[in-house]
Image: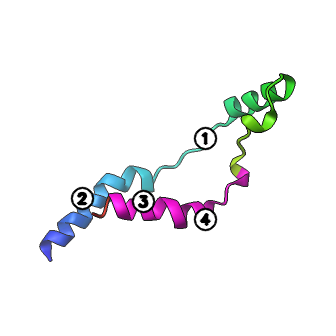
């Protein structure tokens, strides 16, 4: 039992910076790249990236969390 508690406490210490990370990310460079693609010969869909189009629930439930379980909680 004590071993499991120590294991969980270690995981809490490892993931604390990510769990309580309070930041806002700037996508200005991504937007500049998208605008440059529109005005050049590059097809816009080649450089297309819009985080609003990502299904975040699907990503976390079917990709992110299963990989954490697979690779961290071995």
User: Residue 33 location, x and y as percent?
Assistant: 73, 28
For disc 1, the marked residue is: 25
Q: Secondary structure at mark 1?
A: loop
> For the residue labelled by badge 4, is the local secondary structure a helix, a strand or a loop?
helix
Say whether residue 30 is left or right of residue 10: right
Mark 1 crowdedness (10 Å alpha carbons): few <14, some 14-19, many ≥20? few
Q: Quadrant of the C terminus?
A: bottom left
Above or below 28: residue 8: below
Foreground label between 3 and 2: 3
- Mark with earlier residue (2, 1): 2
Q: Is residue 46 left or right of residue 38?
A: left
- Is 59 included in the stretch rendered in magenta? yes
Residue at x 53% of width, y 65% of height: 62
Compared to residue 22, the image places residue 10 above or below, namely below
Q: CA distance from mark 2 to mark 1?
A: 28 Å
- Going from N to C along the chain, the mark reached first, 3 or 2, is 2
Label 4 Cα crowd, 10 Å radius (few <14 / some 14-19 / many 20+): few
Q: Secondary structure at mark 3?
A: helix
User: Mark 2 sits on what residue?
Assistant: 10
Is the residue marked by circle 2 packed among few (<14), some (14-19), or many (20+) residues within 10 Å? few
Of pointers 4 and 3, the one earlier in the residue sequence: 4
- The answer to whether the residue labelled 4 contacts the one labelled 2, judged by CB atoms less than 8 Å apart, is no
Residue numbers of the magenta segment? 52-71
Along the viewing direction, whichever of 43 and 50 lies nearer the viewer: 43
Residue pointed to by mark 4: 58
Q: CA distance from mark 1 to mark 3?
A: 24 Å
Q: Distance from label 3 to label 2 (Cα)?
A: 19 Å
Residue 58 covered by magenta stretch: yes
Q: Measured from the top left, where is residue 6 in percent x and y?
A: 18, 65
On the image, numbered disc 3 is attached to which residue? 67
């Amino acid at each position: 039992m004590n071993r499991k508690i120590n294991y969980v406490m270690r995981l809490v210490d490892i993931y604390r910076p990510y769990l309580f990370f309070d930041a806002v990310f700037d996508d200005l460079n991504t937007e500049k790249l998208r605008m440059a693609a529109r005005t050049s010969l590059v097809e816009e869909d080649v450089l297309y990236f819009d985080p609003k189009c990502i299904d975040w629930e699907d990503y976390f439930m079917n990709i992110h969390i299963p990989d954490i379980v697979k690779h961290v909680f071995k």
